Amino acid sequence: MGKVLVVTSGKGGVGKTTSTAALGAALARGGENVAVVDFDVGLRNLDLVMGAERRVVFDLINVVQGDAKLSQALIRDKRLDTLSLLPASQTRDKDALTTEGVDKVIAELREKFDWVICDSPAGIERGALLAMRNADAAVVVTNPEVSSVRDSDRIIGILDSKTLKAERGERIDKYLLVTRFDPGRAARNEMLKTEDVLEILSIQLLGIIPESEEVLKASNLGAPVTLNSPTCAPSRAYFDAARRLKGEIVDVVVPLERKGLMERLFGRRVA
Amino acid sequence: MNLISLFRTKRTTAPVARDRLQVLLAHERSVLGKSDLIATLQEEILAVIAKHISVDRDAVQIKLDRGASVSMLEIDVEVPAPPANKPSGTSGPSVPASV
């Protein structure tokens, strides 16, 4: 029986899709069988970030409605055969998703894979609730910035009340993934420190992903950053996070970009 | 940037952000964040009490504090003073219980 994870945040643009792809690929590289599921119906993007946008034939809604079999809709990654994608529909409306249908698809995925990672849409509406409904654990993606932290607090409250686990009176594991973190700015007190965010949200820390140009480079190319450049700072942070998800104890450090001498001397960028 | 500004301690913004968030979220958790659980508890506790004593709706306050290791459920019931001759304490005991 696989484990179901939801990657959620409330706020949009904080890195849910990037993190879903990166964590999924990191786990799959470690030999785990992983399915990443896009729940952002109408605004799908996980296919694009993973470089599978031209291979989508059937999607989540086709499977939910019984128009396609799960095996027909799953897209196996070309680089990693332990990684599969279940895309969202781009044309349909999220109302086409039914609770029963979603429960059935997730149950089927749970049978086939070690990890089912659901990429939640932003917001706290139906789509987000369906994405978290079957989750055993949640990764709350948060930027060290006031509006993101506030929305994460809201989503934590919703995870504690609206998931199936919560309804059964069980506890859903909640992990904080801080993304777009700039250690320099945090040290200069220009950015919330991870400890501040942790103290405010009081959930377990999964990892700190440093801000890096490698993330955009990878999405430009349609590859999870952990596959595109596995040794760069954000990738190392994602690999560590993936190991923590598996229950390993890994010290939390913020990996820094290894810079060459010339870059160190002249590499200071404006913005 | 001149030498003076280099050495002057700059007013930093992150602590302000942290303090604003702490104040805001404390408020939101108690009002807007009142979960279904709290609302249900409030209704049911009120119903139980109403069977025996007549209390005002506002006299039952329920608070849930989420902490890292321990969460605290605080139920505060204000019991009205008996109608005649005994105008003693009006506030009932606060019953904290871990959840």
Image (tube, coloured by chain):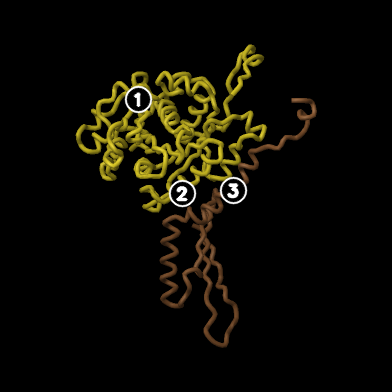
Which chain's residue wears label 1? A
Marks 2, 3: nearer the viewer: 3
Residue for point 40% across, 53% down:
A169
In the rendered image, residue A48, in percent from the top left (x then y), is placed at 37, 24
**Which amino acid type is shown beneath numbered disc 2?**
Gly
**Which amino acid type is shown beneath numbered disc 3?**
Gln
Specify the colour of chain B: brown
Tell me, by letter, which chain the rendering colours yellow.
Answer: A
Residue matched to label 1: A82
Are callouts 1 and 3 both on one chain?
no
Q: Which residue is at the far bottom?
A: B85
Instruction: Determine which of the numbered discs, if any, sits on residue B22 in the image.
Output: 3
Are the residues flagged by discs 2 and 3 in contact, CB closer than 8 Å?
no
Residue B1 lies, with reference to residue A106, above or below; the image says above
Q: CA distance from mark 1 to mark 3?
A: 43 Å
Residue A219 lies, with reference to residue A91, above or below; the image says above
Marks 1, 3: nearer the viewer: 3
Left or right? Give the position of B37 relative to A267: left
Residue matched to label 2: A157
